[in-house]
């Protein structure tokens, strides 16, 4: 029970005194004059005590009985019904849809017209215990490339699944970080040749990026051999595209493509059992069409198709892709990597240990290799709003001669950036 304040106790005492004096035979006018209250006030509490003899003379709550801004029961029932239907993937048009507040709002607007806000839907789900809140530990600052236009940064990753019979399916997914548009292809293995085939298909459909981001998968980085330049990196440099490798063992750095991988696994792979690898592309294309035109990713304001609509997209011509040599040389360009400094003060770049210093242990540095000059530079940024500091510059010799980027790709890459 809420504890009364001093003023509330004094008011209750005066009311009790007024009723007690009246019951003792004191006239109402005298009671009002003694307590410095109106005659109407005295009669009010006398009559109230007659109707409620067990009252404690406390002030009643002043909270309003009607809240005009309260969400109506009809809206709440509709939100909960939509949530239940989304969980059951019904009707069939919602078989790829999510179950969050944004999807509920979109479906509510389509069915009933004006929809409640995302915060209102989230509050309804919270009230009915339909939301799980996760706490994430605070981590060190990691520098990220900026993506302010489509194809500024494209992140690529591989997800492995198996179909009935034991056949493996390697799916390459490339996400445009600005618009969250995706190119996804399925292959029998995850070799460098398959990765190059996927990238060429991506650049024909999504367009040529200003920066290609990869994790440290052997198909992308070249494996365990020191100073080895993989086929994927050679292809990017041949087309004038800089390359960025994410920190070792930190999949969260590549979060846009990891989020899509989870979405792909939950709403496509887990809902469509396959017995043949050849049945996957058709269903996958249907999923991608739905994704581009209907799905709004977290931290995005619209669908991928609408976000890319007002920007010119430079795509790789098919005839240029067919003219690539079988053996790609190392071309002039940049190879970047974000690395976390270990306890001994070292980082690994192309499987070569690079000393940074123990004072930076646990922090992230940005390494840039200029293949033409064969020069490796180590940069450090303590915060997102801080200036970059050059920590080290050293010679990084390659095992092959470095050639210039072909003229047509040099002009093309300059226009894309």
Image (spheres, rainbow, N blue to C red):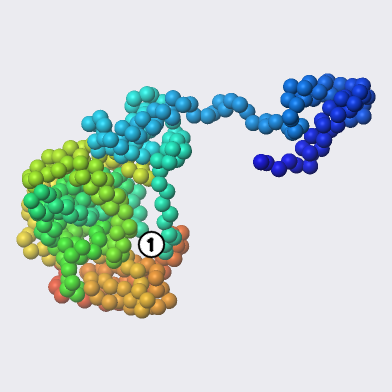
Observer-nearest residue: 259 or 154? Answer: 259
Instruction: State which quadrant residue 407 falls in.
Output: bottom left
Mark 1 lies on a secondary structure that is: loop
Image: 283 above or below 417: above
Image: 403 above or below 91: below
Observer-nearest residue: 156 or 369? Answer: 156
Asked if residue 225 shows in the view, the reply is yes
At 38% from the left and 38% from the top, the residue drawn is 101
Observer-nearest residue: 380 or 266? Answer: 266
Q: Is residue 308 left or right of residue 194?
A: right
Return the x and y of residue 121 as percentages of the image width and height: 43, 35
Return the x and y of residue 239 as percentages of the image width and height: 17, 57
Image: 95 above or below 47: below
Q: How many marks?
A: 1
Q: Mark 1 sits on what residue?
A: 142
Asked if residue 198 shows in the view, the reply is no
At 25% from the left and 45% from the top, the residue drawn is 266
Can you say which quadrant of the picture contains the N terminus? top right
Return the x and y of residue 144 as percentages of the image width and height: 35, 58
At 44% from the left and 66% from the top, the residue drawn is 382
Observer-nearest residue: 362 or 53? Answer: 53
Q: Is residue 166 left or right of residue 153?
A: left
Return the x and y of residue 337 as percentages of the image width and height: 29, 65
Dot 1 surroundings within 10 Å: few (below 14), some, or many (20 or more)?
some
At 41% from the left and 26% from the top, the residue drawn is 114
Instruction: State which quadrant residue 106 falls in.
Output: top left
């Amino acid at each position: 029970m809420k504890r009364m304040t001093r003023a509330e106790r004094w008011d209750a005492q005066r009311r009790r005194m007024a009723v007690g004096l009246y019951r003792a035979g004191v006239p109402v006018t005298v009671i009002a004059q003694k307590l410095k209250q109106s005659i109407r006030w005295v009669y009010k509490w006398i009559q109230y005590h007659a109707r409620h003899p067990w009252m404690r003379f406390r002030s009643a709550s002043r909270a309003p009985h009607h809240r005009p801004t309260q969400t109506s029961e009809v809206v709440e029932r509709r939100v909960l019904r939509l949530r239940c239907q989304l969980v059951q993937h019904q009707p069939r048009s919602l078989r790829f849809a999510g179950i969050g507040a944004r999807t509920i709002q979109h479906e509510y607007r389509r069915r009933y017209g004006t929809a409640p806000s995302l915060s209102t839907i989230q509050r309804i789900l919270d009230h009915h215990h339909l939301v799980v809140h996760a706490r994430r530990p605070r981590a060190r600052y990691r520098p990220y490339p900026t993506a302010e236009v489509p194809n500024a940064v494209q992140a690529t990753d591989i997800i492995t699944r198996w179909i009935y019979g034991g056949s493996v399916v390697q799916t390459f997914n490339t996400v445009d970080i600005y618009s969250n548009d995706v190119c996804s292809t399925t292959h029998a293995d995850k070799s460098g040749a398959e990765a190059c085939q996927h990238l060429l298909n991506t650049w024909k459909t999504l367009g040529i990026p200003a920066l290609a981001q990869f994790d440290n998968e052997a198909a992308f980085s070249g494996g365990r051999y020191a100073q080895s330049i993989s086929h994927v990196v050679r292809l990017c440099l041949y087309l004038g595209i800089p390359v960025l490798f994410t920190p070792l063992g930190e999949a969260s750095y590549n979060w846009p493509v990891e989020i899509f991988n989870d979405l792909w696994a939950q709403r496509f792979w887990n809902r469509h059992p396959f017995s043949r690898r050849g049945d996957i592309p058709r269903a996958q294309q249907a999923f991608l069409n739905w994704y581009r035109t209907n799905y709004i990713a977290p931290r995005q304001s619209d669908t991928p198709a609408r976000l890319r609509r007002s920007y010119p997209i430079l795509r790789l011509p098919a005839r240029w892709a067919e003219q690539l040599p079988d053996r790609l040389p190392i071309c002039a360009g940049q190879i970047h990597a974000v690395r976390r400094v270990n306890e001994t003060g070292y980082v690994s770049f192309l499987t070569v240990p690079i000393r940074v210093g123990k004072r930076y242990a646990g922090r992230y540095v940005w390494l840039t290799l200029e293949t033409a000059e064969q020069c490796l530079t180590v940069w450090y940024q303590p915060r997102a709003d801080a200036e970059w500091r050059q920590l080290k510059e050293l010679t990084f010799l390659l095992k092959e001669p470095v050639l210039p980027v072909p003229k047509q790709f040099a002009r093309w890459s300059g226009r894309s950036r």
